[in-house]
Image (tube, rainbow, N blue to C red):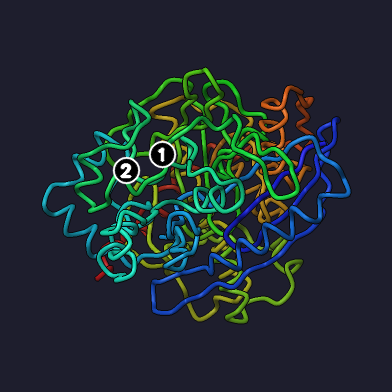
Amino acid sequence: MILALDQGTTSTRALIVDAGGRARALLSRPHRQILPRPGWVEHDPEELTANLLACIDAAAPEAPLAAGLANQGESCLAWEAGTGRPVSPVIVWQDARTAELCARLRAEGAEALTLAAAGLPLDPYFSASKLGWLLRENPEARALAAAGRLRLGTTDAFFLERLTGRFVTDITTASRTSLMNLERGEWDAELCALFGVPVECLPQIVPSLGAFGTLPGGLPLTASLVDQQAALYGHGCRAPGDAKITFGTGAFALAVTGALLRPAAGGPLPTVAWQKAGAHPVHALEGGVYCASSAVNWARGLGLFSDFQEIADFIAPPAIDRGLAFVPALTGLACPHWDRAARGAWLGLSLDSSPADMMQALLEGVALRAAEVIAAMDKVQPVGAPVSIDGGMSANGYFCQILADVLNRELLVSDEPELTALGIAALAAEAAGTLFPLRRPGRRISPRPDAATRLPARLARFAAARAAVEGYAL
């Protein structure tokens, strides 16, 4: 058995994966979402650490062979070397406090460097601008840097040093910072200088599989990587063109490319999918929709529906065919538009528009944004079928059907809700000398017969709605 530790945006979870590749939940601990100012999102690093320790303790009676750790990706913080004492909150990937800085650097032409070296646009989504902000705005961080005792990094590096004593980060997580040279797999001096991040404060970059040290209680940690990359592996995606979309807080699509492919500016992002010890990195394309289930939950808070069963099916034809569209840009537009200033909106409302109509349009809007992401990927790496999907929204039958229609591809809707856990456990097991069978249980959903005929008009109407919110942005 393998312990999968999934430290995510809203909770920290422990799952045991048995030799047959079946996951069983042991413990889930939610944590606070701290919102000190508009656009700022923080977590308490001590709260996250305590939750991880509780998860490790919960697994002790199971006597697992090894453990793997999945992390949030771009979320980052500052802490003191040696003691592991945090001197900042975790600045979460959703946080946009450095949007003005990124805009200024873009206006100065700095995006050419980030695209060439890191493969990433200038966006507060990535860690680099936040780590630089911490050093500029946090007096204690500056003092520790002057004394040679400052650590800067993503949450995985903090947890690894606290729990195993190793100050390292894996290459998938490093690839999400905008500080790593994507071709060399090492910190880039020019990028660090651009964002004001001292390279000596950053962790060593290592493969995703290997000896990460021993967790409290004596359990070896043998794999560590970003949660979305772990989910890609858990979906069974291995060959170029294999793709998955996870519909959680946001929607995150990844497609395996194998070799490093560099899309044109404004498209999907090249990233590292995983790296096994002694092997070259496996690369992928990544594209995100900032708001997916978070948009659904926001609408529920507004009173547009109360029970999720109310939005599982609709009598009316698709809202987009009736001229009603929703653009889920509540925190901006990610791939392939990269416009943080855009904001969400319903377009085409009339006096007879009902809450059900608005929710139907909202679900379709998330699906249409996901279709934009897959279309952008398909221009760089042909995306195969089926596209594998998971996450909370994959339980909604209407959403899955409209997604198949606007992708014009067959979907594989996973029956396994714990694909991040399966992926990280499979990699940890391999590093520990054992293998799990690949299981891909799920139901297949095909596009409706008229989907291809209706697709051009749907995409055009949604593109017009998206252009309207981009033009409205301040």
Residue at the extreme top of the image, as rendered: 279
Q: Residue 220: where, in percent of width, then height? A: 70, 37
Q: Residue at x 78, y 38 (%)?
A: 2
Query: Image quadrant for the N terminus?
Result: top right
Is 282 or 3 nearer to us in this picture?
A: 3
Numbered label attached to residue 175: 1
Is 469 or 145 nearer to us in this picture?
A: 145
Residue, disc 2: 179
Q: Can residue 67 be seen in this snapshot?
A: yes
Q: Is residue 209 above or below residue 56?
A: above
Q: Is residue 73 above or below residue 383?
A: below
Q: Based on the displayed image, in which of its 4 quarters is residue 440 positioned?
A: top right
Is 379 or 204 nearer to us in this picture?
A: 204
Q: Based on the displayed image, in which of its 4 quarters is residue 21 positioned?
A: top right
Q: Residue at x 47, y 54 (%)?
A: 82
Q: Residue at x 51, y 53 (%)?
A: 158
Q: Residues within 10 Å of mark 2 (few under 14, many from 20)?
A: many
Q: Residue 371: where, in percent of width, then height? A: 49, 44
- State the SS at label 2: loop
Numbered label attached to residue 98: none
